[in-house]
Image: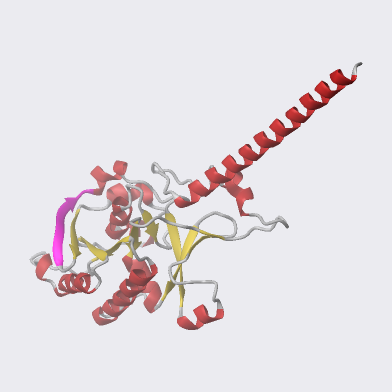
Amino acid sequence: MHDSDKAILILIFLIIVVVACMLNILYNSSYMAIGALALVTPTVGGGKDNYKDNYKDIHKDNYKDTNNNHISRKLIIADNAKFVVDGNNLVHAITGKPHMLPVEFERGLRTLAWSLSNALPNKDIHIVLKNPSKVKKSDSVETLPYFQQLINMSREFPAITFHLAYGTDKKTDKSDHYLKGRDDFLTLYLARHDGYIISQDRFRDFSKFNDIKPFNHFATANGNIIQREKINPRHKLLKTDKPNIGNHIKYRLINKHELLKNPSINNGDIYVDTLGESGYIYLLI
């Protein structure tokens, strides 16, 4: 074989090696980009519980360090992203009380509103609540003291829209407690278009939400009532998605002392947990 032929073969071999390396780099880069996009973009659940479906096997490797240990990753979420907050769930967590006097609930709600306003600047924040269980049918919602408190609070915290799921409750036992979950349904309904949900609730009774009685939805922002509507869950359920790995964010409440001990954590930081199964947000209270 002539030297020129050898040179040509060597050149062809080198070209093949270079092309193979470039293809490998492009493949890995695309894979990582897809994994990152799945974390910061809400996905549509379609009413299916896909917390552990179609996620762990695909994206698990993106959460390992060089020693093959799982690590947490901070999420970067775009400005103006919509956050719908399960208000009753968080107020009970903040106060540590399952039952509260009206003044205690208001204090907890104000703490929540302050924390969210500081934690999520430039975000579209919505807090969903339901009225106390004892409601007289003759009550005019817009004149009730607790709704007036919401109107005043929306003026105090202009970055937040407050929503009230207003209805009456019948006595229920543990098996059908979900029938009182009109605020849970409203939270999911408001987040149906690419919104993030903040709640510890796993919404296990989602498929039964169509049995929730129709209720009235009132919304207030900047001291004004901006929405009044009647909602029938039976008619809206098909347009509502169960929370999924892409849009369900749980919370971890922290105080100033804990922040000082962990300088790498800031109020409002959102992470994917160590197994990549759900997101969580740090909230300063």
231 inside magenta stretch: yes
Residue 224, percent across and down?
14, 65
Residue reaching furthest to the front = 4
| Left or right position of 102 against 191 | left
| Left or right position of 10 against 140 | right
| Residue 104, image quadrant | bottom left
| Residue 161, image quadrant | bottom left
Q: Camera-side residue: 59 or 16? A: 16
- Give the main secondary structure of the magenta stretch: strand
Q: Quadrant of the C terminus?
A: bottom left
Q: Camera-side residue: 46 or 111? A: 111
Q: Quadrant of the N terminus?
A: top right
| Left or right position of 232 against 62 | left
Q: Is residue 10 above or below residue 111?
A: above
Instruction: Write the start and end of the magenta stretch as one range.
Output: 224-232
Q: Is residue 33 above or below residue 136?
A: above
Identify the residue shown where x is 42% and y is 52%.
247
Q: Is residue 33 above or below residue 200?
A: above
| Residue 273, image quadrant | bottom right
Q: Camera-side residue: 60 or 167? A: 60
Residue 196, percent across and down?
38, 55
Q: Is residue 220 above or below residue 115?
A: above
